[in-house]
Image (spheres, rainbow, N blue to C red):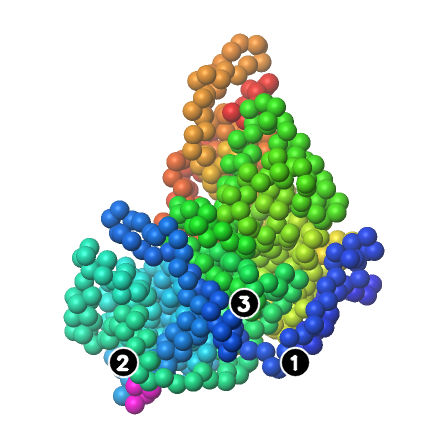
Amino acid sequence: MPAVQSQPKSQSRRSRKYPECTSWFIPFPQQVFSRQSIEVEPSKKDGESDSDPVLHPEDAESGSKPCLGHRLLLSLNPLSYAPEYVWMSYEDVDRRRRELGSALVWFFKRLESDGTKMGRDDIVIVGDVKDELGLEIDTVCIWANGSAEWQLVDLACQAYNKVVTALYDSSNNSTVEYVLNHAESNIIFLSIDRLPVILQLFPKLKYLQGIVLLHSDKDLELFEAYGSTMKLAKSWAKNLGIDIWSFEEFGGIGKQHISEPIDVSLDAVYSLCYTSGTTGYPQKAAILTHGQAALAASCGGIGMVDTTTNIVFSALPMAHAYQRVLNTMAFNQGGAIGFAQPNPLLFLEDLKLLKPTVLSVVPRLLNRIYQGVMASFVDGTVKAALFHYAVKSKMDAHRSTGTVDHLIWDRVIFNKIKPLLGGNVSTIQCGSSAISADVLDFIKIAFNCQFLILRIVYLGTLDRDWTYTRYGLTETFAVGLRVLPQDPTGSFSVGTMFPCMEARVVDAEELGYFVRPQHAKGEHDPSERPCDPKGSKYTFGPDGWIYTGDIVEMDECGRFKIIDRKKNIVKLSIGESVALEQVESLYAASPIVAQLFVYGDATRDYLVAIITPVEGFGKELDSKPSTSKDGDSTQMDLKTAILLALEEQAKFVGLKGYEKIRNIHITNELFTVEGGMLTPTLKVRRKNAYKKYKDIIEELYKMPIPSLPSGTSGRL
């Protein structure tokens, strides 16, 4: 990277261009150069890449390898799954995606011959993909939890040039109606619990002509036993004039009408990805191409250990581009993918059975693991002292050398922690929201992860060591910035540009930042024709760059730090600006916090919060007196105890006075996706949270700020 030239408005940064992908490096200071540079040989020449990731199993060895795994459903009441994963081989997956793809070809040919592909004339849709972009595409919608069947449909669409669009689990009726009509989806693959919604909405769905239930016949037999009758569903669908098939029935149609995969152009549309968003506005779609999918998976895998023995735990929403890229990276390496059960309470059970080497999770799970482990070593015993000494020893070693192994401490302490994640995890891939560098590095040293990969969108400060290690957007197929493997201080940055990306920084004058928020572009940039101008105008600039709204700085190694997020900064009445998401993330690392929502605005001079403490916090309050200023023993109530714990956390992470929470409302109610308080990627919908707690927030500001007793600790 050449020396920065002084420019009044913007500066650009880019990696070396990707086509040959023979090397990618930025000249860092000598002491970290060896850990910041990578060199890879091209597996294909420029233009030869495709997004069809399944290995063609010409030889018996690769064809018989496990590819997609899941746990069989045994019972609905009580809900139970088989105590082991069952696997489809690469050969099985190749066969089944050909059958599904051939069935889709048959289905769309039938619509064209019947003249029904363009939908019913009695429903008028203004602003669909044909009207806005002039695209003539065959669109397939998927609405279900991530599963082997979900992945098979995606692979079939890739191989036969069908465009995938997906609905999040939490999508409400209006979103479902909008997406199906806007994307012109003629067929939907869904789980049986969502079938009544689609049948009820059918009179409003212009293009929908077919439904496929995303279950095996064995699963459907279980549903039959509990009243979800397939015969009744087919009768209902027939009266409405729509076809319905089981997953195996539809695959059987393809088996009878088998056709070969299509040589898909890199410029062909792969997916219309409707972003989850935090504003409640669903009409925002990113147009993603096959070339982008191939490039994202190829660049995303650079620097990872290329092994055919990887077992990936897939737990993030498949509707998000991020999880689909991770799975494609696994296919490229010849690894296996095991899918999590729909119930998050079964994740740890899944991990123990699957024993994955690669884990994809959300930060909340890592925070809970960190809090749980740390909370079990706070009793002042020799064992606790030894644990904290071991953590400090390994953390110091990691941040100076990049190593995550220790001959003694691993045997004595950390090998007992590893089984929490199955015992074999070497790479953790995480996305959606914020996580602190301390939590991140603790996970590394506790589970001996050679490097931790994160694709998150925001955190960090100019004077605080809290940040992300990877950054991406839906519009760029989840790639953008990344920290290279074994970077000893990588947890304090989002790293450098991917080989296929470039960024520009411009002034944010209204916030007092100059040559800062980051724009993403490059060979991997999204279509310059956004699917919905109204939904995309906040992202795409008139010059073709994506305006992310993130405030960045560059460190001495040429790595970016994301220090603020433009749209989530409030200026308090005292004139100080506060990044609310950042404050929430720093407090979230406290072992007493299960969830919180921090609020402040321009009419207030301090912050308040809605908080849910971890289960069990405060049970021992009656037996733990605190000492007042006059030396008298007083009973500490729950609110005081939580405020003390938050104060201790604020001091630990170095929050300034105006960034501290001064008053709280305690609730046992957790925000959920189903309740509309979280996005599918588990970020707080701030608008909805404020609407729900508006009256309580007003009351908090009317109260006097609670005074805290001296000589007490917030850790109970």
Residue closer to the observer: 327 or 582: 327
- For the record, the magenta segment spans 109-113
What number is the disc on residue 334?
3
Residue 45, numbered label: 1
Mark 2 and mark 3: Cα distance apart in space: 44 Å
**Disc number lying in front (2 or 1):** 1
Which amino acid type is marked by label 1? Answer: Lys
700 over 224 or under it: above or below: above
* 304 relative position to 254: left or right: right
Residue 91 located left or right of residue 388: left
Residue 438 picture quarter = top right
* Between marks 3 and 1 in the image, the one whose residue lies nearer the viewer: 3
For image coordinates 51% across by 71% down, the residue present is 62
- x 46%, y 34%: residue: 613
Residue furthest out toward the bottom: 113
The disc label shown at residue 120, or none:
2
Q: Is residue 173 above or below residue 713?
A: below
Residue type, numbered disc 2: Arg
